[in-house]
Image: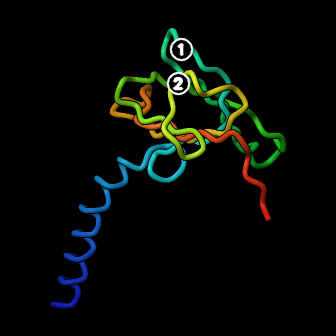
Amino acid sequence: MKNQLYTFTALLFAAVIALPCASFAGKKGGGGEIKGKIEQVDTTAKTITISLKSKGKKGGDSGASSDTKTFTVTDSTKITLDGKDAKLADLASKMEAKVTPGTSDNTAASIEATTKSKKKG
């Protein structure tokens, strides 16, 4: 009986710890990072649009679809290009990018862009 109580308490504790952590995980990728190709950079509106590729649905739709997500870039957004500090104006369409959303899903906390796509060895 004691062992069952300890097991139940341990599981309850794990659930209480895991639930708040899961809410910070985001919808795309681990840690809320969103990866894709830059589709558009608007330095006037201070936005960046990322093209996301998603796998086709199981059971019929074998093709991949492409969605886009637009982020607002703020003064506190950390931008890097090929690992070096950059500005929004340095980014261009077709570059690979990883965006970490900020406090709002529509703002970017950080943008990591690369000029070359990584080749698998």
**Mark 2 — residue?**
88
Quadrant in the picture for the C terminus = bottom right
Percent position (x, y) of residue 109?
A: 40, 35
Compared across the picture, whether 68 is left or right of 87 comes to right
Q: What residue is at 78 percent from the left and 55 percent from the top?
A: 119
Quadrant in the picture for the N terminus = bottom left
Query: Disc 2 residue type?
Result: Leu
Q: What residue is at 25 percent from the left and 82 percent from the top?
A: 7
Compared across the picture, whether 30 is left or right of 90 comes to left
Percent position (x, y) of residue 66?
A: 72, 32
Residue at disc 2, secondary structure = helix
Query: Disc 1 residue type?
Result: Thr
**Mark 1 — residue?**
43
Compared across the picture, whether 92 is left or right of 71 comes to right
Instruction: State the CA–CA distance, disc 1 to disc 2.
Output: 7 Å
* Pointers 1 and 2 in contact (C-beta within 8 Å): yes
Percent position (x, y) of residue 95?
A: 69, 35
Single out the residue that lies furthest toward the left: 2
Percent position (x, y) of residue 38?
A: 65, 30
Relative to 78, does residue 31 appear above or below in the rendering? below
49 or 92: nearer the eye?
92
Residue at disc 1, secondary structure = loop
Crowding around mark 1 (Cα neighbors within 10 Å: few <14, some 14 to 19, many 20+) is some
Which corner quadrant of the image does residue 57 belong to?
top right
Compared across the picture, whether 16 is left or right of 68 comes to left
Q: What residue is at 44 percent from the left and 24 percent from the top?
A: 73
Q: What residue is at 56 percent from the left and 21 percent from the top?
A: 89
